[in-house]
């Protein structure tokens, strides 16, 4: 989808970021997929996606044509966010909240893989974004 050229990065801590993710999950959870919460935040909201060895969390459910502020951070080591097959690639670093404004332009299920080697379970680190 469309990603604006504007992005921002702010300092955070893993504990602060985890608290923001947990608050979003508590407010917007609509189900579970393989034990992982599926969240459907309203259009225009801040959407938090976290990386940790070896998981992307939670599953995001977004609406096609709507704009969101996507937050990315890591709780442990550097990870790489790669949205497939869109080819959107970003670095995800502990201590920083990377915020990108995104507008999904196509419905479907999109895989998120880690494209930065993050130790022995790296190959298992796959997440999901669902666009309805």
Image (tube, rainbow, N blue to C red):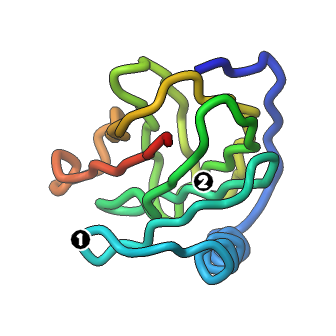
Q: Nearer the viewer, residue 109 or 5?
A: 109
Q: Residue at x 43, y 59 (%)?
A: 59
Quarter of image, res 69: top right
Q: Horizontal placement of 70 versus 30: left or right?
A: right
User: In this rendering, is residue 5 above or below 20?
Assistant: above
Quadrant of the frame with the N terminus = top right
Q: Horizontal placement of 36 versus 70: left or right?
A: left
Name the residue that disc number 2 marks: 73
The disc placed on residue 106 is none
The earlier-in-sequence mark between 2 and 1 is 1
Where residue 45 appears, x then y in whole percent? 79, 53
Neighbours of disc 1 within 10 Å: few (<14), some (14-19), many (20+): few
**Most extreme residue toward the bottom, as rendered?**
26
User: In this rendering, is residue 104 above or below 12?
Assistant: above
Whether label 2 touches label 1, CB < 8 Å:
no
Q: Residue at x 77, y 19 (%)?
A: 4
Q: Secondary structure at mark 1?
A: loop
Where residue 94 appears, x then y in whole percent? 59, 56
Q: Nearer the viewer, residue 46 or 106?
A: 106
Name the residue that disc number 1 marks: 34
Where residue 68 appears, x then y in whole percent? 73, 42
**Most extreme residue toward the front, as rendered?**
132
Name the front one of labels 2 and 1. Answer: 1
Quarter of image, res 36: bottom left
Q: Residue at x 43, y 19 (%)?
A: 86
Where residue 127 appears, x then y in whole percent? 34, 51
Q: Secondary structure at mark 2?
A: strand
Neighbours of disc 2 within 10 Å: few (<14), some (14-19), many (20+): many
């Amino acid at each position: 989808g469309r990603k604006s050229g504007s992005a921002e990065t702010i300092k955070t801590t893993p504990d602060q970021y985890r608290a923001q993710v947990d608050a979003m999950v508590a407010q917007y959870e609509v189900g579970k997929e393989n034990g992982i919460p599926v969240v459907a935040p309203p259009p225009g909201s801040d959407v938090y996606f976290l990386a940790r060895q070896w998981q992307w969390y939670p599953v995001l459910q977004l609406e096609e044509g709507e704009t969101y502020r996507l937050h990315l951070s890591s709780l442990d080591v550097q990870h790489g966010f790669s949205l497939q097959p869109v080819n959107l690639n970003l670095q995800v670093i502990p201590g920083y909240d990377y915020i990108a404004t995104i507008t999904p332009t196509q419905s479907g299920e999109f895989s998120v893989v880690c494209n930065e080697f993050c130790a022995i379970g790296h190959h298992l680190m796959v997440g999901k974004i669902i666009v309805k």
